[in-house]
Amino acid sequence: MTARIIDGVKLAASIREDVAKRAANLTAAGMRPGLAVILVGSDPASQVYVRNKVAACEKAGLHSVMEQYPADMTQEELLKRIQALNADPTIHGILVQLPLPKHIDSHLVIETIAASKDVDGFHVSNAGLLMTGKPLFRPCTPYGVMKMLESEKVEIRGAVAVIVGASNIVGKPMAMLLQSAGATVTICNSKTRDLAWHTSHADIVVVATGKPRMVTGSMIKPGAVVIDVGINRTPEGKLCGDVDFESAKEVVSAITPVPGGVGPMTIAMLLVNTIEAAERARANT
Ligand code: GUN
């Protein structure tokens, strides 16, 4: 079978173009959409992610503020910064890059972000709205995956979807979005017995484990669609996903590459969430 390679770079570019038009309209109407990104510490991967997010904002005409703090910043100082950004009318979206240093309670930090500015969609009130089918913000990575499935015209209604990885950032919200779209969803985790049994019965497999190439072609049903959320570096310094692309592409009908798959979509959907936050703020003024 010749697999379709789902081009996240191309789809993300078209989404960013649409965001740029909406940003220009808002700016012309006197409200430039603004995103604040906070990074605590100097994790090299997080620094790259945050820089990419801020650069994408600038390119789409959004105002962006990047605040970088040392790893020993206190929790109280961070909460104060968030409260100031909550009250700042030029900022419509706030993102605190995860993971945070161990002495900071991530849950408390997320709950301190105003739900209306929580462009990650991680606040409990946004998680609850997503779960009950009335999302305000959809978490960026799962939202990007849904857009990819949509653009590929993948039938979600009635499909069997298996998600490998049960994080709050990807796995759990991914399950909610697929379930709302009519899929029958299983979330697998690191304790799942016979993971291959689950994955090999799925029409759609989403993998977000952080374990390089752990899902191989022999674990996939012929013709399934595979979405690889992972991004890992091999000992040789090459990027690879959580799926073994070479063996998987021989059995799937469509698959996302790494790099150039889900990664660019996560950033594009962050811009969508920010523009939506700004449009809502404008409607409420
Ligand atoms: N760390 C890894 N992915 C994400 C994300 O989508 N948002 C935030 N804030 N941190 C992350």
Image (spheres, rainbow, N blue to C red):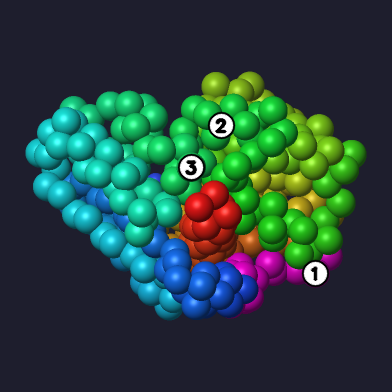
Q: Residues within 10 Å of mark 3 (few under 14, many from 20)?
A: many
Dot 1 amino acid type: Thr
Q: What residue is pinned by disc 2?
A: 127
Dot 1: element: loop
Q: Which residue is mark 3?
A: 116
**With 142 as the anchor, is 120 left or right in this view?**
left
Point out the tag, 2 or 3, that comes first from the N-terminus: 3
In this view, the mark in front (1 or 2): 2
The residue stretch that appears in magenta: 1-17
Is 270 displayed left or right of 143 in the figure?
left
Q: CA distance from mark 3 to mark 1?
A: 44 Å
Count of numbered circles on the image: 3
Rendered residue at 22%/55% (across/down):
67
Residue 168 visible to the viewer: yes
Amino acid carrying label 2: it is Ala
**Nearest to viewer (mark 3 / mark 1):** 3
Q: Residue 2 has which mark?
A: 1
Calculate the distance from the C-alpha at mark 1 to the C-alpha at mark 2: 38 Å
Residue at (77%, 37%) from the top-left corner?
180
Q: Quick one: label 3 or label 1, which is nearer the N terminus?
A: 1
Which image quadrant is residue 276 in? bottom right
Taking the magenta stretch, the answer to whether it contains residue 14 is yes
Left or right position of 208 against 247: left
Q: In the rendering, at what x and y percent does residue 18 appear?
A: 62, 73
Q: Position of residue 251 (x, y in %)?
A: 77, 56
Q: Secondary structure at mark 2?
A: helix
